[in-house]
Amino acid sequence: MFRAALLAAGSVAAATLPAAAGNVFVTNEKGNTVSVLDSATWEVIAEFPAGNRPRGITIAPDGSELYVCASDDDLVRVFDPRTFEEMHTLPSGPDPELFVLHPSGNPLYIANEDDNLVTVVDTETHAVLAEVPVGVEPEGMAISPDARVVINTSETTNMAHFIDAETYEIVHNVLVDQRPRFAAFTEDGTKLYVSAEIGGTVSVIDMTAEPPAIVRKIDFEVPGVLPEWLQPVGIAITSDAARVFVALGPANRVAVIDGATDEVLDYLLVGQRVWQMAFTPDQSHLITTNGNSNDVSIIDVAALEVIRSVQVGQQPWGVAVAPD
Amino acid sequence: MAVVPGGWSCLFNLCLRWRGVVFALLTAAATLPAAAQEVRTAVLRIEYPSLLPLSRIDLPVPDLGLAGAQLATMDNTTTGGFLGQSYDTVALSVPPEDADEAFRGLLDRGVRLFVVMARTPELLALADAAPPDALLFNATDGDRALRSEACRANLLHVAPSDAMRADALTQFLVWKKWTDWALIEGSNPADRALAEAYRASAAKFGAEIVAEKVFEDTGGSRVSDSGHVLVQRQLPVFTQDLPAHDVVLAADATDYFADYLPFNLWSPAPVAGSAGLRPLTWAPTHESWGATQLQTRFEKLAGRPMREEDYQAWLALRVIGEAVTRTGSADPAKIRAYALGDAFALAAFKGQPVSFRPWNGQLRQPILLATGRMTVSVSPQEGFLHQVSSLDTLGLDRPESACTAFKE
């Protein structure tokens, strides 16, 4: 009887092993784990060890590999998004924090904060393809939709560096405000948004200008919140570029911006120290990581409402969602 | 450290001669394409005679401050490389009697931007001897008078005043509701001035000094073998007659007794100020807001933890670098105008931008409260509000400052 019950339980577990599509992966910086949520039910379905101080996280376009910056291990850990087993590691240089994948899934461009370098790693051969010298404390990474330009932001130099994706040469620099954290392109590649955490602004860069230049700086203001707490970090843009969401760190709010006018429409109250964000594949929902309340907030993108908070591990930092 | 002929020793590309002459010559730009604009700066460090510190952890290092300046120059050079700007920092370390000559020598070399690590008399002498086109940054002196009646228009203060440090600590103690203080001050003038800063801060934020004692400086060496035996017996007796108190504040600017106080008082009260919980601009324990990155860069360069003097010299040169980056000019007048203007903001690994008070040239900055093992908190504390900036709850505010040199 006992054996039969056990077998049955085993087969049930195997049968319900979650399909990866729509699963949400959240790095827990202090907990050293990744929490996995089912975006259909918003239940936490698993939590697995992810190395020391996991921060940046991304997933291959075909959903086959999950990449995690294990900052204190000085490498990138690669996991199977279905089994949560570690497949291998990639060299990253010391203290990796953020990276971006080529739209094809290869290579991976990693900001290497300690050495003022962007490291380019082949995700198949695991070889370092290039090291690009950039400004002091490289952090944010983005790649243009046509994959021609890789953007790196340097936190102490305060620039967005435009790196030619073929030659690995810096072809252009744009000075932004203090401590640029994150960069994101619109899907049509015409606009680039760069957040400046300490400057408190988001710079909007017109990519159609020659050379690309800042056309607007978005400021934030929330009644009752000290200006120094309005620290823009993560950026998420809908594929139709109609809405731009900006995580405001210790202000515990996500700013909603009209992508046509770049005016702030609203501020959504989320958990504490909101950091990074990711959409579900159909873009109906946006997940935010809230480092100081140990949860993620789920935003209904159409209604612009926070519909739910879900407790995850200790000090959630980054988030990625498996594609359909 | 490599030794090269002529009494020079070189650490990386920082070369120094021990007394009197050129300490450092840093031109990382040599490896970059010819730059259109060269920013020449100097660090002038005055060496005062001093005894060894109470704690071995604080033993003197030859490159104190200068290593921070070197890192800032490297950071500025990396940024400047994208803008056609190069940075050259010369450092001199001299005794007080050679300060004038060293300053004149640097002026003769064309330097007009100075980071000065000196005390008030030398700082004022240099500021008053400077030509009209020079700009000085005070990297280490916390004297209240320099931010008030003795202020100089050509002297900006990157170092926080003693009042800023005192207010940072007081806010935390008030937040904790530890408002009954026993104050133990040293007998040297600098200790007395620090005690005065704590008195003013207590009055400002509503703490009460329930008793005061002076710990006489009787000279002699600071530590003796198994000296703790006597310390353990004498200090409880010294503090036995204090009335009930929440915390003991130590005002020991000259570093001869404060670190003996924790755990040796008659009462179990915590110690703050010059020992215990200390208000600092930087601590090797500070990790938040990306500070780990600066710590790592510095330790890789200098082979030791970053001290306050290193951070403040770094910050002074970063102020210059930031102003040059944004204005495209190395003209000290333009740098000064930009630094004192509303547009200036600089990330300094403290969670909010630092900027200058335009009425006395003091850099607004958060202050760390650290034990030596851990950063306990960072001031200003939540709930201490100000109409301009919460950072202006620390130190002399505009109505309190008698400085008039900054009125255009």
Image (cartoon, coloured by chain):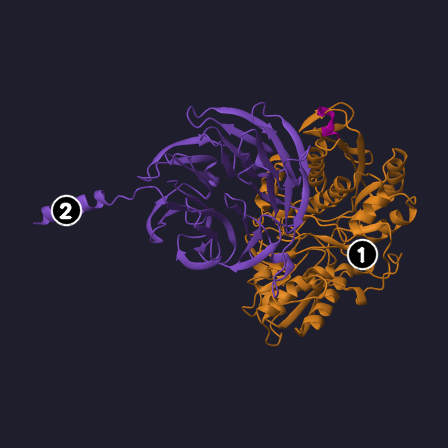
Q: Between B407 and A297, which is closer to the camera in this rendering?
A: A297
For the question of whether residue B275 can be seen, the reply is: no
Image quadrant for the C terminus of chain A? top left
Helix, strand or loop for disc 1: loop
Element assignment for label 2: helix
Chain B's shade in the image? orange
Image coordinates for residue A78, horizontal then vertical, percent: 40, 35
> Looking at the image, can residue B165 be seen?
yes
Residue B27 on the magenta span: yes
Picture quadrant of residue B394: bottom right
**Which labelled disc corresponds to residue B358?**
1
Residue nearest the observer in this picture, A198 or A33: A198
Residue B92 in the figure: left or right of residue B227: right
Q: Which residue is mark 2?
A: A8
Q: Is residue B140 magenta?
A: no
Q: Are marks 1 and 2 in contact (CB under 8 Å)?
A: no
In the image, residue A246 lies at what x, y percent?
55, 51
Given the image, what chain letter belongs to the residue carrying mark 2?
Answer: A
How crowded pointer 2 is (Cα within 10 Å; few <14, some 14-19, many 20+) is rated as: few
What colour do you see for chain A? purple
Residue at left offset 34%, top offset 36%:
A80
Residue type at mark 1 is Pro
Q: Relative to residue B369, is residue B43 depicted above or below?
A: above
- x, y percentage for residue B392? 72, 62
Q: Which residues are magenta?
A: B26-32
Looking at the picture, how far across and down is residue B407, in whole percent? 88, 58
Q: Which amino acid does the dot numbered 2 rest on?
A: Ala
Quarter where residue B388 is shown: bottom right
